[in-house]
Image (spheres, rainbow, N blue to C red):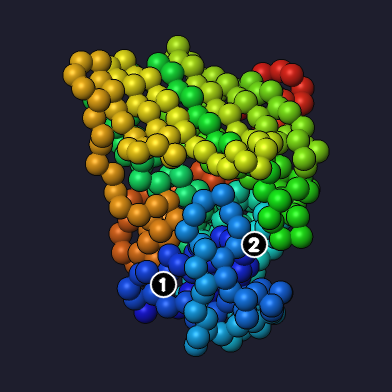
Amino acid sequence: MIRVGIVGLGFMGKMHFRCYKALEDVQVVAICDTDKAKFSDAAGTAGNIAGAEAPLDLTGIGLYDDFDRMLAEARLDALSVTLPTYMHTDFTVKALDAGVNVLCEKPMALSVEDGQPMIAAAKRNGKLLQIGHCIRFWPEYAAVKQIIASGEYGKLLAATFQRLSATPTWSWQGWLMDPGKSGAAALDLHIHDSDFVHYAFGMPKAVFSRAASGPSGDDDHIVTQYLYDDRCAVTAEGGWTMTPGFGFEMSFNIVLEKATIVFDCNRSPALKVCPAEGDAITPAVAPGDGYSNEIAHFAKAVSGQSVPEIITPEQSLESVRLVMAEKQSARSGEKVAL
């Protein structure tokens, strides 16, 4: 039985709780949050993806408002760090140094420099560190990664990704609206697609970006061209400047030599492959969602089971570097090499 703790009982903490509770041989034994009111009012917290609305049953779980005490008493095998981004480095390093495996929410850190101590702590303690890039595990995105890698439909010609949201006014103490704590939409939201571009196509040679300042006063709507040696056109647009009635959407169009692949989270079926010849196909995808699949992957790895390499801390840090280059390009108006 894997003994799991969660630090941070906001939207993502509740999402992780739901996912762990669905697994066999995993027990959530401790939760830490400085706001003890969350333990008595454990109803859902707002977010832009459904799945964490139901009230939590915290019966039998150790509830802490002191992280050091939880680490000392709870005998954890693994910990989910579901705190605001600016807290990731300190809490992750402290847990790894206490001998606990860590699943830390994305983005890894606010900068490449802040992410490096996390990797160093995992290595010196011989513990697992996984960053929560859930899109790599999202069934439709995972299926498309396999389709692209197979070469069945030929080379990549073009790809366009979009991730657009109403302004996330729901965050604890408004931390998402403080770019010094969140990195603004570019680092908090858009990084999902930057990371998938990195995962599916490799790191680009350079980026060219334009960004608009939004409610955080920083890069809250960004459009990037990812530049490769091959003649292909890869772009991603992300932002949380949309008005409240817009809600949320994530989508992509990928053009291969022999097929176009289309995904829209608000359409059914969400994913289809349109080959050059014949009718459109609705590919089979794995069950679940990105959150449940990434947490199952993490739990298997902690238990010692062999799992495929889907995400590494080094890749997560490279995705932070990629977004930092995009932000630099948006500010300078120039192409930035990687």
Quadrant placement of the N terminus: bottom left
Q: Quadrant of residue 111?
A: top right
The residue nearer to you, when weighing 268 against 276, is 268
Q: Residue at x 64, y 21 (%)?
A: 208
Where does the image place residue 162, in percent across and percent down from the top left? 53, 31
Task: Tell me the mark number nearer the camera, choosing from 2 and 1.
Answer: 1
- SS class, disc 1: helix
- Considering only vertical position in the picture, is 279 above or below 127? above
Where does the image place residue 200, in percent across and percent down from the top left? 42, 33
- In the shown orientation, is residue 157 left or right of residue 52? left
Q: Residue at x 71, y 44 (%)?
A: 183
Q: Which residue is mark 1?
A: 21
Real-space CA distance between mark 2 and mark 1, rounded to the nearest whole angstrom: 20 Å
In the rendered structure, which disc, 2 or 1, sits on the residue that comes first in sequence? 1
Q: Residue furthest top?
A: 231
Quadrant placement of the C terminus: top right
Q: Residue furthest front?
A: 245
The residue nearer to you, when weighing 168 against 79, is 168
Q: Amino acid at mark 2?
A: Leu
Q: Which mark is residue 200?
A: none
Q: Residue at x 47, y 77 (%)?
A: 28
Q: Residue at x 71, y 18 (%)?
A: 334
Q: Amino acid at mark 1?
A: Lys
- Residue 280 visible within the image: yes
Where does the image place residue 320, in percent across and percent down from the top left? 61, 41
* Crowding at mark 2 (Cα within 10 Å: few <14, some 14-19, many 20+): many
- SS class, disc 2: loop
Q: Quadrant of residue 190?
A: top right
Q: Which residue is mark 2?
A: 83
Where does the image place residue 166, in percent across and percent down from the top left? 64, 42
